[in-house]
Amino acid sequence: MEATLRPVFTQDLAVMLARLYTGRWPIVALRNGYHGMTGGTQGLTAVGFYKHQVPAGFGVEHLAVLKVYNPRLGPEASVEDIVRYHLNDLDDHLDSCMSDGQVAAFIAESTQGVGGVVTLPPGYLQGVYDRIRAVGGICIADEVQTGFGRTGTNFWGFQNHGVVPDVVTMAKSIGNGMPLAAVAAREDIMNELGRKAFFNTYGGGPVQTAVGREVLRIIDDEKLMDHCRDVKHSHIVGDVRGVGLLIGIEHIGESPAAEMKWAWNRLKEKGFLVGGPGPHGNIFRIAPPMCITKDDVDNFCTALDEVYAQVAARR
């Protein structure tokens, strides 16, 4: 395990490990995925708002992301139909677009955060992992937003999908505000770093790692993962989705992006900061502190009701 201060460094390191281990270059990722904004990780990221007009990490292929809400197959498509369609698309991509089908790694969030809080449907990650490994690649789970119990059902988001990745990247919740991030990988993959010198100026800092250990203790002692499940509450607009305390609210209407921005500012005036805006500027990304109380949730929902009433009155 390698600890660092910068979340984006974990993605850079994970990709480097994959390329060292496999001896290959191509990486497969998902559209609307967010994995950082450095020169290297902007290549992994596929949200236009976060991609500057500069050369970025290359050798990355982006697949269409699965959407159960408003899928490209139409409203009558079942979850099984959607998963099958996208796995077939991956088969075709590996066969026709990749050099001899060679892949270094697949990287994805189990629930896309910045990309609009889109949770991948059951069966998809299992199918992708099987296919990537069949052609000699490895699988990377980006757990920066979904890790450490935020989904309310498992400590890691990938566990909700019945898969075990080869590399896991983590940050944010690991330090509860303290700059801290880490990469965990299979021993044989991590050993690739031993072939050359490798270090990080702030890697393994004693203060940061002590905070990380204390955060883990608090998550366990205060049963915060169970708490994420128990206090979840949703207001339905176009679609409300997510897991535990990682929730997305997708707005619809004639001007959903403009109305979302207006509502976002009204919530800010009421003392509530929510994330956003998603790939089309119309999504609230709600990821509150895991220690949020039910009173806090009730207050937020009251404020959200009031703001949505104002939005309706403006139409």
Image: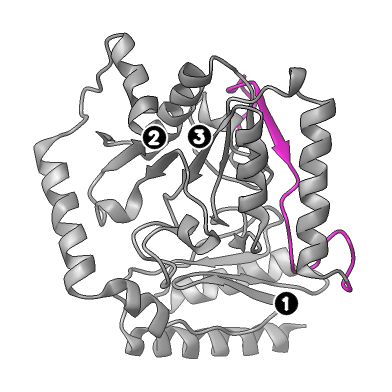
User: Which three-letter amino acid code belongs to the residue tagged 2?
Assistant: Thr
Can you tell which of label 2 and label 1 is closer to the viewer?
2
Magenta stretch: dominant SS? Answer: loop
Percent coordinates x, y for residue 163 in the rendering: 52, 53
Say above or below: 239 vs 281: below
- Picture disc at residue 302: none
User: Which region is colored magenta?
Assistant: 52-76
Q: Horizontal and vertical percent for residue 23?
A: 54, 14
169 lies left or right of 76: left
Q: Rounded to the nearest whole Å, what is the CA distance between mark 3 and mark 1?
A: 30 Å
Q: Are marks 3 and 1 in contact (CB under 8 Å)?
A: no
Amino acid residing under circle 3 = Met
Query: Image height check: is 260 above or below 171?
Result: below
Name the residue: 67% across, 58% down: 281
Q: Which residue is mark 2?
A: 10
Label 2 Cα crowd, 10 Å radius (few <14 / some 14-19 / many 20+):
many
Check disc 1 and give the amino acid type: Gly
